[in-house]
Amino acid sequence: MHLDVSAHDLHGSSSPVRLKGAPDICPLCHRSIHPIHIYVILLRERGLCQSVYRCTHYKCQEIFIGTYEATNATEDSRDVFELTHIAPSNPDKSSFSEIIKETSPTFVQIHNQVLAAESIDLSQLVGIGLRKALEFLIKDFAISQNLGDEKSIQESFLGKCIEKYVTDTNVKQCAERAIWLANDETHYLRKWTDKDITDLKLLVKLTVNWVENVLLTQKYVEEMKNKNV
């Protein structure tokens, strides 16, 4: 999909350009849209075009800017530019169950901040943030399972905490591996060179899911005693 328009430079001169890659998701409300194109400026010296769009969803209607880079190609006597970036953007919020929010609200808060960093291309901070989020999730979960050991859990190293206080096999195995990859994100040299941030995100998701399963199982077992006994 492309857009043929006139791009205007600082002095008011216009040039015909072809913009490839019209946004189809609003970066502010995250809804699928066919945005209204408003205006294009040409930054000739930097090989860029910037196009102003308006969201067409009635609950949003805000404007945003797509940045396009020159490709050295020409089509139909027009210079071609490819979409590379959209701004501003609102990060998606983490979607966690109520029982996770109640058990570890700080985990949810940090996870949302990780998404915010990622949305503005602070990619080097994502793994570091997930490492901190994991520590709160795992320790809060461990405290919920070992109510008399809160102080010891809070003060323990995370690996030792998992080893000593997390008894569910699925939680333990996923949490350990998530921490291995998260630690890689904070160190100069990586141990797990065949894994990346995508694997870390998936392991965090798995850890959350297994923690949720344990907590929900306990909740219903406690609430629904055998009435025949």
Image: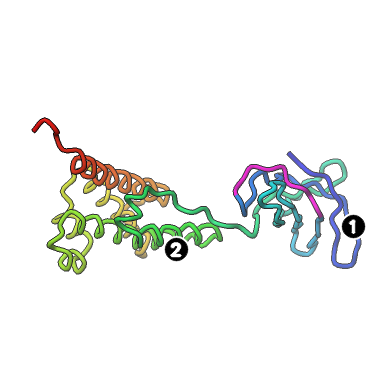
Mark drawn on residue 140: none
Residue 8: image quadrant is bottom right
- On screen, residue 15 versus residue 83, left or right, reads right
Above or below, comparing residue 229 to residue 204 in the picture: above
| Magenta segment main secondary structure | loop
Circle 1 Cα neighbour tier, 10 Å, few/some/many (<14 / 14–19 / ≥20): some
Which residue has dot 1 on it?
Answer: 14
Residue to which mark 2 is pinned: 125
Q: Secondary structure at mark 2?
A: helix
SS label for mark 1: strand
- Point out residue 113 in the picture as x, y percentages from the top left corner: 46, 62
Question: Where is residue 140 shown, x and y percent of the image?
Answer: 26, 59
Which stretch appears magenta? 30-38
Q: Is residue 225 left or right of residue 49?
A: left
Residue beneath the point at 50% across and 58% down: 118
Residue 107: percent from left, percent from top: 35, 59
* Quadrant in the picture for the C terminus: top left
Label 2 crowding class (10 Å Cα cut-off): few <14, some 14-19, many 20+? some
Three-letter code, disc 1: Ser
Q: Residue at x 41, y 52 (%)?
A: 197
Most foreground residue, 19 or 131: 131
User: On the rendered structure, is 35 left or right of 6?
Assistant: left
Please say whether residue 37 is one of the residues in the magenta stretch. yes
- Please name the amino acid that badge 2 sits on: Leu
Q: Which x, y percent locates residue 135?
A: 29, 61
Outermost residue on the right side: it is: 13
Q: Quadrant of the N terminus?
A: top right
